[in-house]
Amino acid sequence: MNELTVNNLHLDYGSGASANPILKGVSMHLRRGEVVALLGPSGSGKTTLLRAVAGLESPKTGTIDIGDRRVFDGAAGVELPAEERNLGLVFQSYALWPHKTVFENVAYGLKLRKLGAKEIEAKVNDVLAQLGLGALGARFPHQLSGGQQQRVAIARALVYNPPVILLDEPLSNLDAKLREEARAFLRELIVRLGLSALMVTHDQAEAMAISDRILLLNNGKIEQQGSPQSMYESPDTMFTAEFMGSNNRLPGKVISRSNGHVNLQVGGIPLTGSARGQDTGADGMPMIRVEEVRISSSKVDNAIPLPLLTCMYLGDRWECLFSDEQTSVRAYSKHRLDAGDYWLHMPAEKLWVF
């Protein structure tokens, strides 16, 4: 069963001739127990879509259903306010009341729903315990770490057991190390509680780690959607390939195509690649993930020779840059390389041509 269904949603800022279209016919769904990440660059429409689902933005046309309830229908003039949609929302800034304790922050939504004091206490204590905040109920937000504040915001969204929780870049305020820890915690929490979640992020690693399915937005439309693995390993477009990983773009010329194989030249060297996306003839763009390039000190098939420019230490590996006047290629090595010329092997199935 779908917990959330969005169909052909259009949303403009402004009106008339000056209208700026933000969502251009977006359709998506969220199944029970599923985590869907809305991924995309700034201005792609991902936060606007989340806010439209929450009832914080007014679309122009389309429909939004939460379970079997229609909360927005542009043609019928139906638009339920945010407070009647019963969705949990975790803001990017956490939006905690600074003058209220952790317990009071989490209890706030239950008080608005006029629950009894004993029921509120039981529900709040239960969700605080689930999130490892049981001993912090009497503290104020300024007495908490960033990770603890994030968990309080999540507790407040979960306490009344909403059918869907909406997460607006929930990890963006944390430093790099804490983000990795919080990412693991959030995924574990979602799986353990069986939550249905829609999460906005611009970080592809975060989207792949936490979600079951990714919707990649580009200029108000869904560019591609699928599992994190399929999005990373089988991109349909150049935009998806570039957004979902770290890549080398090569100045190649397509010579011929046959049955998904592409013959091309890079710097006068013949290579074989794999066709992706639509056939663009001689104007195709060769691309390969940085981690797929293999470094060899001797000549190998399907490889180009380049001199080593520099190596950068990343802790678990070295990132090496090879470059001449026309071509630059990055590749990973387990060891620092000596200066000199190398052959950079590019497996045909990993050398994509769009």
Image (spheres, helix red, strand yellow):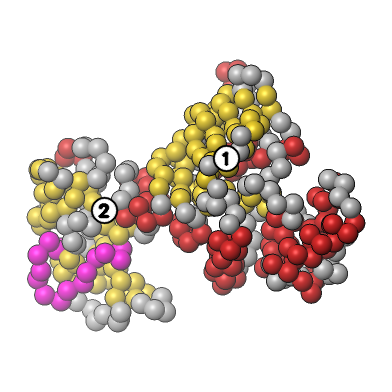
Asked which secondary structure carries label 1, the reply is strand
Tell me if residue 277 can be seen: yes
Instruction: Give the left or right position of residue 229, taking residue 153 as reference.
Output: left
Mark number, residue 285: none
Q: Could you tell me which quadrant the C terminus lies in?
A: top left
First to last magenta residue range: 290-304
Question: Please, what secondary structure does the residue beneath circle 2 have?
Answer: strand
The residue pinned by badge 2 equals 287
Which residue shows up at 34% across the image and 72% down it? 319
Q: Which class describes the residues within 10 Å of circle 1: few (<14), some (14-19), or many (20+)?
A: many
**Viewed as shown, does residue 95 lie left or right of 15?**
right
Residue 26, above or below 241:
above
Q: Which residue is mark 1?
A: 4
Residue visible at 12% across and 55% down in the picture: 271
Q: Residue at x 20, y 46 (%)?
A: 275
In percent of width and height, residue 308 lies at: 24, 72
Where residue 220 sits in the image (x, y, percent)? 49, 35
Closer to the camera in the image, 235 or 116: 116
Could you classify mark 2 by the number of other residues whose Cα lies within 10 Å: few (under 14), some (14-19), or many (20 or more)? many
The picture places residue 44, in percent across and down from the top left corner, at: 51, 41
Asked whether 226 or 261 is in front, the reply is 226
Vertical placement of 122 versus 251: above or below?
Answer: below
Q: Earlier in the sequence, mark 1 or mark 2?
A: 1
**Residue 94 visible from this viewpoint:** no
Amino acid under label 1?
Leu
